[in-house]
Amino acid sequence: MNYSNFFVLDHGWATRYYWYKSLDYDIKKDEIKKIKKQKIRFGLHSGTTPGDIIGGTPVLNFYSENFVRLLKENKIKSFKAYPVIFDSKYNIQMKYYYLDLTSKVSEIISTKGKYNIHFDDKGKRSLYGRNGLYFNLKEWNGNDIFGIKDTLHVIVTKRLKDLIEKTKLKNVVFTNVEKYSFGVYE
């Protein structure tokens, strides 16, 4: 197996699809515990159409009941699905879940891929970027969906990508890990 068979899974950016917002807290990585315990309510920030993956923060996405069902029907078990609570005034008909990936590989390999540094118009704020999201392939245990330690990246195999595309789930985007770009502001 090589990197061409792995994809970062994410939501699309079409404005017609739902974008959520937290009604109770600013979402941070450590707030995921509150989502699992259903202690955070969500509402709609924008959009008019339910998608099978919806976003609202740079930190995490929510997945539709259709998405979770597809995983279960294909005996993909490397996750736990936690229901997301939407305030009733938003009348969200589709059920959404936070997926906690139980299979992870160790950190991103920093010696692969290309680095980019970009500055804003004033030359003060920089974006340190990477092209290529590489991980230790020997650590992959064969699961079709998994994460990378200390990140919230969701990685899927070509097999799962093909299943999702065949099912025609909405608002789903795949980027091959070799072409994936990411970065942080300094």
Image (cartoon, rainbow, N blue to C red):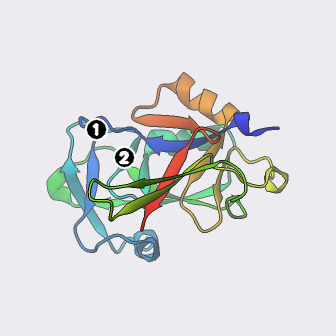
Give the residue number, with chain letter if any, for mark 1. 17
The residue where tag 2 is placed is: 54
Q: Give whichever of 103, 57 is nearer the camera.
A: 57
Callout 1: helix, strand or loop?
loop
Disc 2 on helix, strand or loop?
Answer: strand
Residue ID at (47%, 25%): 168
**Residue 84 horizontal/vertical position (percent):** 37, 60
Q: Does residue 137 appear left or right of residue 80 in this picture? A: right
Relative placement, left or right, of 73 versus 14 is right
- Please provide percent x and percent y for residue 139: 81, 57
**Image marks 2 and 1: residues in contact by CB distance under 8 Å:** yes
Three-letter amino acid code of the residue under disc 1: Tyr
Instruction: Name, please, the residue furthest toward the top.
Output: 166
Q: CA distance from mark 2 to mark 1?
A: 7 Å
Relative to 56, residue 161 above or below: above
User: Which residue of the protein is positioned furthest toward the front in this rendering?
Assistant: 123
